[in-house]
Every structure is written in C-alpha cells, then in structure tokens.
Amino acid sequence: MDGEINCKLTSFILWEESSRHYSNDVIICTVNTISAVFALFCNLAIIVTIKKKNLIQTPRDILIGSLTLLDCIVPLVAKPLFIALRMSLHDDHVTCSRLQQLTKATELAVMFGCGCSLTHIVLIAGDRYLALRKPIKYRRPRTKKVAITFACTCWAIWSLIVIIFDKIIPRRFENFLRIFIATVLLTSLVFLKVKAFLIVYRFSHTLVHDRNSLKVEGLTERDRKVLIDTTFISIIFMLLFIPTAALIVIRPAGIYGNVVFPWSLTITLLNSLLNPMIHVWRNRLLRRAMLDLLTTEH
C-alpha cells in the first residue's frame, strides 16, 4: 500500500493500518454481504406489511417502524462501507489518504447506525414505561403524534451528532464523548426497564380484581407482553454492542485488533438482521399479516 509507513489511522474501527488478515477479512466480508442482503429483505418485508395492512395502531408501532427503517439503512450504507474498508487494506494501489477517507466514512456510518438504534431502543423502553404506568392515557391520539416527533428527532439528532464529530470535535475528545453518550443511553435503558418491571411486579401483587378494573387489567396485560417482547430487543442489542464497545475503549493490538475486533463489529452489525427476526417471532399479528399478504399476492 502506498504510504504504508506514514499512514496513521486513529479511527475507533481501525486504529492501526496493520490491522489486517486476508483470509479472515474475506470471511468477514462474505458474512457481512450475506447478512446485509437478508437484513434488507427482512426489514423491507416488515415495512411493506405494516404499510399495506395498516398495522401502526400505537406509539410503540411507530417507534418499531422507525427502528425497522433504520435497520434498512445499516445494510445499505454501514455494511458496504465496512466491507470496502476491510478489502481496501489488502489493495496495494489504495493511497493512505483514500484509506483515511474510507475509514472516516465507515466510522461515521457505524456510529450513526449503532447510536440511532440504541436511542430508538431507549425510546421504546420509555414508551413501555408510559404504557404500563398510564395505560388509558397512553392510547390517546396525541400520544402517537408525540411518538412520531420523538422518532424524527432521533434521526435528526444523530445526523447532527455525526456532522459534529466529522467537522468540529477534535480527535482527542471523540473517544471520551462516544463513551459518555453510550453510557448515558445504556443507563437510561436499564433505568426505564427496571421501572417498567417494577410496575409489572406491583400490578401483579396489588391489583384488585373487580368488574371496574377489568379494562385496565386487559390493557396492562397486553402492554406487559409487549414489554417482554421489547426486552428481547434490548438484551440482544446490549449483548452485541457491549463487547465491541469494550474493545474500542481498550484498543488491543495483535490478534485482538486484526482478527477479534472485525468479527466483534460484524456481530454488532447483525443487530439489523436480528431485530426483524425478533419482531416476526414475537408479534403474532405481524406474522399473520405477512402470511396473508403472501397468499393474497399469489
């Protein structure tokens, strides 16, 4: 590679130019390509089903739909850039400046995808908390408008964050700010989940089963089920994200930098494929709508 000796890379996804292993990168690129195709297909199938069957009934559906749309962006942008970056490390004709540009673009795409996904999951956790705490008020039409506002704001904020990191924030402060943002979001997620499960616990032990409480009980039972469903999404994301975040902070050299970390990031990006699988697995209404759509189309 031209300029190999003087090429200094300080990205959180590639902190040393020697971070490469050809056979490992070929396998990684193959896995990312296949998973990107399946992720795009699955998420588009859900979006089409939601649109044609008009399945957006609650604020939670709006947030899930926004997350599904985001999971279409990851296989279209972040994964192709990551694949191009890993293969560019083995191209002797790629200049140092071109590699730095590709690294920066991949870094920003991955940060947007992971950050916006985590923020959506926090918003969904807040939605579940509100649904359990005030089940009647939650279903008012105004709440859906609030969910739309939050979803749009999430996209706008992370677009702005990416621009700020690209144009304004000095390199020496970037890692600290990423850690700070991730810590705030993860702490908020855990806090909201704990609060929601405490409401479920109190509900199970204090509900007075009289005729007047049946409607509220039914609403809360449904929301409790949805809470469990969305908890799967939260747990999966944390299991995929935290190991990669730890490696980014530590930045180990040797095999951990050129073999383990690329696989860890690949697994993190699988979140865009696992999310739609969880939606279909846990949502009976969505499954039926997709099957109905397939049968009517044929």
Image (tube, grey):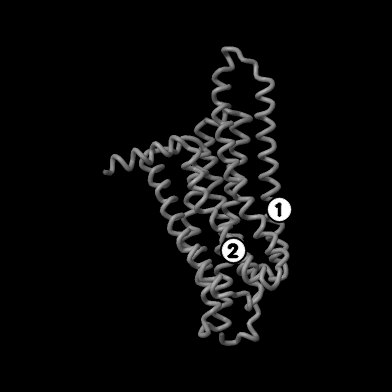
Q: Circle 2: is it few (<14), some (14-19), or many (20+) Cα within 10 Å?
A: many
In this rendering, position of residue 252 left or right of residue 36: right
Element under disc 2:
helix
Q: Amino acid at mark 2?
A: Trp
- State the image coordinates of residue 110 (x, y, percent, origin top left): 57, 62
- State the image coordinates of residue 206 (x, y, percent, origin top left): 69, 20
| Count of numbered tags | 2
Residue furthest front in the image: 23
- Mark 2 vs mark 1: in front: 2
Q: Which residue is mark 1?
A: 183
Q: How far is mark 2 from mark 1, CA to CA? A: 23 Å
| Residue at image point 69% right, 43% down | 190
Image position of 267 with respect to 253: above or below: above
Residue furthest left in the image: 298
Element under disc 1:
helix
Looking at the rendering, which quadrant does residue 2 occupy?
bottom right
Image position of 145 with respect to 152: above or below: above
Q: Are marks 2 and 1 in contact (CB under 8 Å)?
A: no
Foreground pick, 148 / 60: 60
Q: Amino acid at mark 1?
A: Thr
Q: Which mark is residue 297?
A: none
Instruction: Tell me the quadrant of the picture where the N terminus can be found.
Output: bottom right
In this rendering, position of residue 169 left or right of residue 71: right
| Residue at image point 68% right, 64% down | 248
Instruction: Tell me the quadrant of the picture where the C terminus can be found.
Output: top left
Q: Which residue is mark 2?
A: 263
